Image (cartoon, helix red, strand yellow):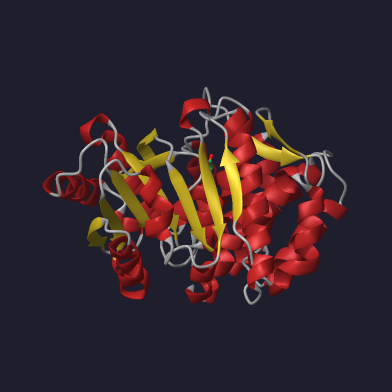
Amino acid sequence: MTLDVVPVDLGARSYEVRIGPGLIDAAGAQVRPFLRRRKVAVVTDETVAALHLQRLLDSFAAEGIEATALALPAGESTKGWPDFARTTEWLLEQKIERRDLVIAFGGGVIGDLAGFAAAVLRRGVRFVQIPTTLLAQVDSSVGGKTGINTAQGKNLVGAFHQPTLVLADIDVLASLPDRDFLAGYGEVVKYGLLGDAAFFEWLEAHAPRIAQDASLRQYAVRRSVEMKAGIVSRDETEEGERALLNLGHTFCHALEKATGYSERLLHGEGVAIGCALAFELSQRLGLCAQEAPSRVRAHLRAMGTKVDLKDIAGDLPDVDVLLAMMAQDKKVVDGQLRFILARGIGDAFVATDVPTEAVKALLAEALAARG
Ligand code: GLY
């Protein structure tokens, strides 16, 4: 299997996403050309540290690179002010200077938090993303969005800070629990649905085997990263096209809030349910044919991921509360809900004039189907 290299073209801040097997063991050699002195600081979480940190540290040692590591508790609750303060102060204690590199080694929580710490440390130090989950490899490690959650909501404090390099090790995905892998798949399928019908067809044919087959996995990650890289290159700060990456996310954010950001619903599961709802809403508004939402749902069912509100265990609030939660989403512009809708599979667009009644009716039916 070869290494795939996807460039993210952003002028002087351009970088590569390298995708392939064995990249953790090769990280020292991959990172070394970017170092001005042989010193890095690794930010990770305790779960990833137990499974993979020693190999990463060995790869740095093999290149004569001095590496220290901070392992934070695993989980979304780490992505807040206390661990952010702890991380920035630890980086200062490690005497990380502007010419050094911070290594974000973990899933989306670690990438977002360590990236934000790098963005503000000494007014900005460079960082490398080594994402260890499918979700982080195809989405959060690419594109430079960094940040933390606050009491007011998710990702409300942060910065655009592009990494210097992204290393996506395909082998590491084999150690993910099935549920986490499938949750990440919600973000993979999103790319086909928003802009590449041929990729969606490929996923329909091959995705049921990607958890087992490394070469299929590598292609799925590469194609997802190519799509994200293209969009980010054209619209880095989300003035337009980048909003398409939020397909399914307005529904998802409300459902995550309604379930308390808990194990009841992982982010990628919410994205899958949100994509199914966005296609259903598009069909009801006469934007796409009935076949489209049916295909989306059939594929998600075949993959075994969550598809419907009835797949979420426990109580959910009523329609009005869910709508109010959507209205708090940071994608709201001038008080108007912005949805990503679709004219068909692979043809999404930003809609700002969605009738609230249509959203309400859709959610009411989906809630009623929970019995
Ligand atoms: N995850 C959406 C974005 O990076 O824009």
Q: Nearer the viewer, residue 297 or 25?
A: 25
Where does the image place residue 46, in percent across and percent down from the top left? 29, 68
The structure residue drawn at horizontal position 81% and vertical position 45%, both measured from the top left corner, is: 283
Q: Is residue 365 above or below residue 160?
A: below
> Which quadrant is home to the C terminus?
bottom right
| Residue 36 in view of the camera | yes
Seen in the image, is 235 located left or right of residue 153?
right
Seen in the image, is 272 located left or right of residue 49?
right
Where does the image place residue 68, in percent across and percent down from the top left? 21, 58
| Residue 313 in view of the camera | no
Q: Nearer the viewer, residue 319 or 58?
A: 58
Where does the image place residue 292, in percent across and percent down from the top left? 83, 52
> Which quadrant is home to the N terminus?
bottom right
The structure residue drawn at horizontal position 48% and vertical position 44%, both measured from the top left corner, is: 325
The structure residue drawn at horizontal position 29% and vertical position 37%, both measured from the top left corner, is: 125
Where does the image place residue 320, in percent across and percent down from the top left? 54, 45
Seen in the image, is 177 located left or right of residue 2?
left
- The number of discs equals 0
The structure residue drawn at horizontal position 64% and vertical position 51%, both measured from the top left corner, is: 224
Residue at the extreme top: 334
Q: Image quarter for residue 131? A: bottom left
